[in-house]
Amino acid sequence: MTAFYHVCFAVPDIEQAMQDLQHSAGVAWSDPLSDRLGEWDYRIVFTTGGPPFIELIEGPAGSPWDASAGARFDHIGFWTSDIGQGSRRLESEGLPVDFSGCPYGRPFAYHRVDSIGARIELVDVARQDSFLNRWHPGGESMPAIDEISKG
């Protein structure tokens, strides 16, 4: 089993992206959620049905999810047993932090992976229950990268 649980696209129009993927691929969506992180209001949605999920996120210009130049593949998401250790591990492997939600009280970090033109998102497994409650009620726990054995 892998700790991979979603792919994410940053989009300028979340409803259009949902509709296009529903019609072309038959995916079903949860209801989008509006939220705020720091100075940025954003909207987010995940597919239904369990992992791996597709995530769409619509954020303003200048935000970590800026799609003002057009929709783009943004990141691959993984659960981690410890966001601090996981971030340090990726940095030591040459994958710098592009953005961290930790200073905002959100235990996730995006790391740039230039070789694929996207980011890896690590999300602390402590957030998994709230993720499941919101996006996949009744869903089973998902594995996380064991940072202790990686360290």
Image: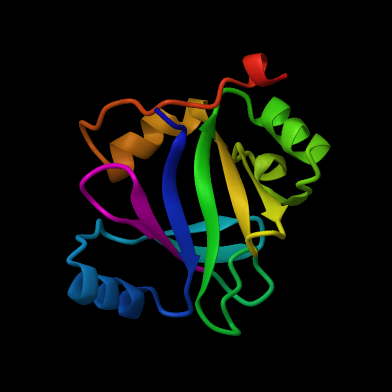
The residue lying at 39 percent from left, 34 percent from top is 130
Q: Quadrant of residue 14?
A: bottom left
Q: Quadrant of residue 36?
A: bottom right
Q: What segment carries the magenta color?
A: 45-58
Looking at the image, which is closer to me, 119 or 104? 119
Residue 5, percent across and down? 41, 42
Figure quadrant of the N terminus: top left
Residue 32, percent across and down? 33, 61
Looking at the image, which is closer to me, 21 or 107? 21
Looking at the image, which is closer to me, 132 or 143? 143
Q: Quadrant of residue 94?
A: top right
Q: Is residue 103 left or right of residue 138?
A: right
Residue 41, percent across and down? 54, 65
Toward the top, the furthest residue is 149
The colouring scheme, among rainbow, by chain, secondary structure or one colour, is: rainbow
Toward the bottom, the furthest residue is 69
* Image: 71 above or below 34: below
Residue 61, percent across and down? 64, 77
The magenta stretch spans residue 52: yes
* Image: 131 above or below 55: above
The residue lying at 63 percent from left, 55 percent from top is 119
